[in-house]
Image (spheres, coloured by chain):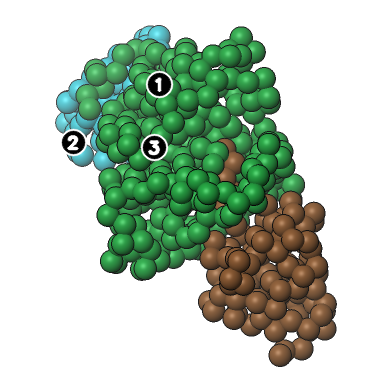
């Protein structure tokens, strides 16, 4: 697991932003991968947010688009993150 | 000196900016590269604006001639 | 197209875009000959349809089975107070034709389903998704992929929006981006979470821009890219997205040969929890 002194910033969008109640979440715990980030979010921000992140089988919802520093996360949830990174979580918006 | 004969002519006296340019542009679109279009516009703003727009669009103003009641602009479609 | 084919009024009406090097008389002729279907005459459909009509897109189809409600007027700028209770597609037709009598508007006062969509979209060159629910979004996507119709998709919520342009066979489709619908009732609608009216305006205008570019064959469309708008931060970002080679509808070996039951696909037919009212 990589060092994570300054923390990572998670930028939320759409329904997840609404469920968590804030645009950005800063995680200063040791997080090694995007998967770690997703687990922390799901643990800390209520059941509704958790159900937007993980499906009933406990897999990451396939309709999340994960970015690290604005680039697509090449390994999905397994993508490593380091201190200072910004992780964006996009999800579909149905409103029209 | 050879007098250049235009392939097409339009009289746009009385047509304000930017319609005079729009009509010039539409006529140029119908023409092949190398053909000549003669346009007559009012003196004043039209005589300044149309040649400028012609060149911005990439065509060539061959010559402009002051007339008693307007300005004749000869354009090469590029 | 010969300049004499435009009326004097058309030359004046469209002068500000004919002037554009990317448009000209040739482009204006393409717009007048174009046929665009707008799904939804609501928040997104309104600005899209308004700008397409103003630009002279010659045939516009409007699909919407709803009636105008007072809560719509905050953002659905096709409709006014005098239209309350009217079917939206007819209110839209009147508004669009009053802006531009060159445009023929065909109203479809129906819900799109697997039974009617392929026939409806067959009449059009481009489809715009301005719907407000997941089943319709997947339905429109699949139909456009099957019929090889370019589709401009967008979605909004609160102050945010997303836009992408789907050209079947060239870039990713909606299923490539979002392969699984969310569990029913989980995602808030604009009814629950709210939406700023101007959000719909910004995002719908971007959709209109994309459609006009498709018709005119100019610029770079959002193919393989999602534009992310955040009105609170006032940021616009564009993110690259890839086509999924294993996509069931547009992938290398598609498993879907036709349309499915989208209410069922989105879990609505067998919803385990109450939908938010």
Q: Residue B57 falls in which quadrant of the image?
A: top left
Q: Nearer the viewer, mark 1 or mark 3?
A: 3
Q: Relative to the observer, which residue lies in front, C208 or A43? A: A43
Q: Are marks 2 and 3 in contact (CB under 8 Å)?
A: no
Look at the image and give the colour of chain A: brown
Q: Look at the numbered disc 1 and give the secondary structure of its residue.
A: strand
Give the cyan chain's letter.
B
Residue C222 in picture, x, y percent from top left? 46, 52
Q: Relative to the observer, which residue lies in front, A55 or C163? A: A55
Q: Marks 1 and 3, how far apart in space?
A: 16 Å
Look at the image and give the colour of chain C: green
Q: Residue at x 38, y 63 (%)?
A: C247
Residue B24 in sight here: yes
Q: Does label 1 or label 3 sit earlier along the sequence?
A: 1
As drawn, B11 above or below C108: above
Q: Nearer the viewer, mark 1 or mark 2?
A: 1
């Amino acid at each position: 697991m990589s060092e994570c002194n300054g923390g990572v910033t998670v930028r939320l969008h759409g329904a997840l932003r609404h469920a968590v109640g804030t645009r950005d979440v800063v995680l200063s715990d040791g997080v090694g991968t995007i998967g770690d980030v997703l687990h922390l979010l799901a643990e800390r921000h209520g059941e509704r947010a958790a159900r937007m992140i993980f499906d009933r089988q406990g897999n990451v919802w396939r309709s999340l688009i994960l970015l690290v520093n604005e680039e697509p996360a090449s390994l999905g949830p397994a993508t490593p993150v380091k201190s200072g990174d910004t992780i964006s979580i996009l999800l579909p918006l149905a409103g029209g | 000196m050879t007098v250049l004969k235009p392939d097409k002519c339009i009289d746009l006296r009385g047509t304000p900016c930017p319609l005079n340019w729009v009509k010039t542009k539409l006529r140029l679109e119908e023409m092949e590269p190398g053909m000549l279009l003669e346009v007559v516009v009012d003196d004043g703003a039209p005589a300044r604006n149309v040649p400028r727009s012609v060149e911005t669009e990439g065509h060539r103003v061959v010559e402009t001639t002051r007339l008693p009641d307007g300005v004749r602009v000869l354009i090469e479609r590029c | 197209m010969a300049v004499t084919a435009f009326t004097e009024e058309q030359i004046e009406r469209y002068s500000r875009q004919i002037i554009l090097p990317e448009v000209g008389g040739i482009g204006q002729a393409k717009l007048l000959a174009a046929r665009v279907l707008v799904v939804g005459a609501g928040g997104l459909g309104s600005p899209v349809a308004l700008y397409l009509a103003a630009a002279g897109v010659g045939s516009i189809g409007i699909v919407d089975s709803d009636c105008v409600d007072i809560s719509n007027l905050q953002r659905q700028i096709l409709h006014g107070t005098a239209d309350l209770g009217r079917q939206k597609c007819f209110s839209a037709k009147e508004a669009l034709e009053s802006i531009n009598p060159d445009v023929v508007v065909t109203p479809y006062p129906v819900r799109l389903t697997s039974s009617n969509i392929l026939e409806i979209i067959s009449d059009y060159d481009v489809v715009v998704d301005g719907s407000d629910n997941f089943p319709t979004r997947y339905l429109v996507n699949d139909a456009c992929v099957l019929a090889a119709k370019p589709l401009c998709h967008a979605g909004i919520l609160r102050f945010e929006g997303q836009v992408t342009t789907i050209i079947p066979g060239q870039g990713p489709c909606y299923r490539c981006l979002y392969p699984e619908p969310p569990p029913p009732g989980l995602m808030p609608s604009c009814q629950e979470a709210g939406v700023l009216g101007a959000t719909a305006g910004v995002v719908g205008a971007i959709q209109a821009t994309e459609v006009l570019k498709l018709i005119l064959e100019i610029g770079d469309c959002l193919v393989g890219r999602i534009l992310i708008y955040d009105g609170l931060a006032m940021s616009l970002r564009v993110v690259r997205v890839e086509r999924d080679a294993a996509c069931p509808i547009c992938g290398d070996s598609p498993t879907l040969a036709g349309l499915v039951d989208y209410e069922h696909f989105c879990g609505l037919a067998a919803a385990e929890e109450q939908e938010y009212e």
